[in-house]
Amino acid sequence: MKNFFILLIFCITCFTYGQHQDKVDFTAASVYIKPEPLKRQIKGSVVYHFEVKQNVDSIFLDAKNITFTKVDLDGKPVNNIKTEKSLIIKRKFKKGQSHKLNIEYVTEPKQTVYFIGWDDEIDGNEQIWTQGQGKYTSHWLPSFDDMEEKIEFDLTIEANMKYKVIANGNLVMKSNETEKFPIWVFDMEKPMSSYLLAFAIGNYNKQVLKSESGVSIENYFYPEDSLKVEPTYRYTKRIFDFLETEIGVAYPWQNYKQVPVHDFLYAGMENTSATFFSDAYVIDSTSFIDRNYVNINAHELAHQWFGNLVTEKNSEQHWLHEGFATYFAYLAEKEVFGDDYYYWKLFDTAKTLSGISEKGEGESLLNPKASSLTFYEKGAWAMSILREEIGDSAFKEGIKTYLDKYQFQNVTVADFITEMEEVSGESLKHFKEVWLEGDVFPMEETKDYLMKNSSSLRMYYVLKHGDKKTFTSSDILKDSELATQLKLELLQLKGSFPELELSPLLTNDDIKIRQFAAQKMSKISEISKEFVKPLLLDDSYITNELMLYNLWNSFDYDRSVFLDRTKDIIGLPNKNVRLLWLTLALFTPDYNPSENTAYYKELIGYTSSIYNPEVRQTAFQYLFEIKALKGDGLANLIKATNHHSWQFRNFSRQLLDSLLNDEAQKKEIEKVAKQLSSTDLRYLKTKLNFK
């Protein structure tokens, strides 16, 4: 009977699980965390303060696979029910009461907390970081998956003295540095949703900037990356100052931090006052032209207002987060790179969205299951059109009113539209129908917008329907009045290029034009060879990579010359040039044959977990293509099939499946597998039977 009663209570709780506890208001939390990285474990405690708004006979916290060692209410043990997903406190709570809930626990998070570098032999690359986006913080802290429960969190972390600790809020105290495990205490002054709570532990130095308004901006970096600080964080202060001015509401938190982490799941995450981002965006100056952090930098910072200060009530309102952050990030890029950059970026996204819409796959911005492309890019377009409709002044006033009115609260799209209608005095019925509710992307409206606001795009649409596409590439380049992006679009309209027409592009002063030409080339003739060779050392790692392969493929008698010229280039953070170079060197029989073993060892080494997934994936692919994936490379591939990044995990599984179709490779895999742990073999066991 007792078991039946517990099951009944559990079922009732499951019915409300994930719902907002509107009868109880949790206001503050003091969290204590001690990670045990070798055990991949978190020991912790949390003290919650809450107020009862209406009589209620239970409260709950989301808690995924957490073992509780203490649950006290107001200093005394309290009846509770523990499940795999929650902690339920059974007691009659009366309206008007205030309580303190004290919890101690241990957990081995299956996700959300990532222990990186603790199982290798490299000293100093160890990290611990969290990623709680959506509703995952409850894997390491009994908390609230629902975004509507906003709490003022203070976080205390105990960590080995070798490492820096970064978390939300202001570092108010650090215990004696001579202690083996000093205590770091972080204070948040304002409430936030649990999913935005975060910490990172690792080997970091930092650069400190000050915004015009006096906010401290801390940019973290690995000690060995001191020369990459400027290009990585280029324009950070300018972006911060611009967004504060453009949004019209002061940055809402005590300080701002940016932290690169290894093996991150996404490009970046806007934890309150502490953005974490993939260290694949830590770049040198040459990389800046090909791939930089500017957009992510601005996007995650914009979320500090749109998402963190004012938060959606549920996933149907997701435009209020991603569409807004994308739009304001584009405005920040416009400030940095100019009008042409901004409008051509919108043009590119409009083409993509229109193509999807024409295939009948368009989506409403109010669809909670819409794609990221819809929420981000269509969302940014909706903001652009809204501003055009109601005017610049009303738009800026409406944004400020919206943020001021709903700060530290949760909102719906309807709340935002109401504010904009009241400020502008206009009905937004048509805007809602077309841009928010409609699933067809209105390409004609976007075209009108672009032609009205951009002389460069206005010229493009005129020339596109004229005879410009019959001109030679030289004709297009001669017109100095044309913006780079317009030249590129006109060149793209031409389609294929005679080789001789590519020559003036390859020697053009504009690096983007040279890169375009490099992408158009494949087999190179003797006539073009001398035009192409300088691009092996061009100021673009993408161009270096393209030209190295194309020249190597076109002139077998000169392969050693091309390899010698590029032997010291590493490339982008994904090591694009070096990985290609090693592969080609191994495939060139007469090139330094005595070094083949070293080249192979280096290429295999890049499949190791010490490198980011992009590096590893390319190394795996090259080794597969030259039929040299064996030994340590295979072992690393088997381990990668269990990686926490689903994109990399899926790639690794598909590649392993391909190898298993070859009997010789299958035997090699079985041989390697005998040296690995049962955990490493989780996926492989689904494909092979092991005794």
Image (cartoon, rainbow, N blue to C red):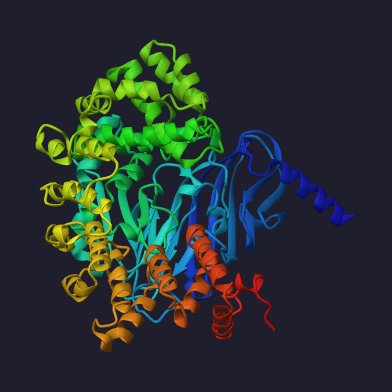
Q: Nearer the viewer, residue 526 or 438?
A: 526
Q: Nearer the viewer, residue 336 or 442?
A: 442
> Residue 439: image x %, image y %?
52, 28
Q: Nearer the viewer, residue 690 or 87?
A: 690
Tell me the residue at 69%/41% (across/down): 16
Q: Height in image: 25 above or below 293?
A: above
Q: How many marks?
A: 0
- Quarter of image, res 259: bottom left
Q: Height in image: 298 above or below 617?
A: above
475 relative position to 277: left or right: left
> Residue 403: image x %, image y %?
38, 29
> Residue 107: image x %, image y %?
58, 65
Tell me the residue at 53%/37% (across/down): 370
Q: Nearer the viewer, residue 329 or 285?
A: 285
Image quarter of the N terminus: bottom right
* Residue 567 visible, this orientation: no
> Residue 486: image x %, image y %?
21, 35
* Residue 27 visible, this orientation: yes
Q: Report the residue that reaches farthest toward the bottom.
A: 594
Image quarter of the C terminus: bottom right
- Quarter of image, res 524: bottom left
Q: Report the residue that reaches farthest toward the right.
A: 1
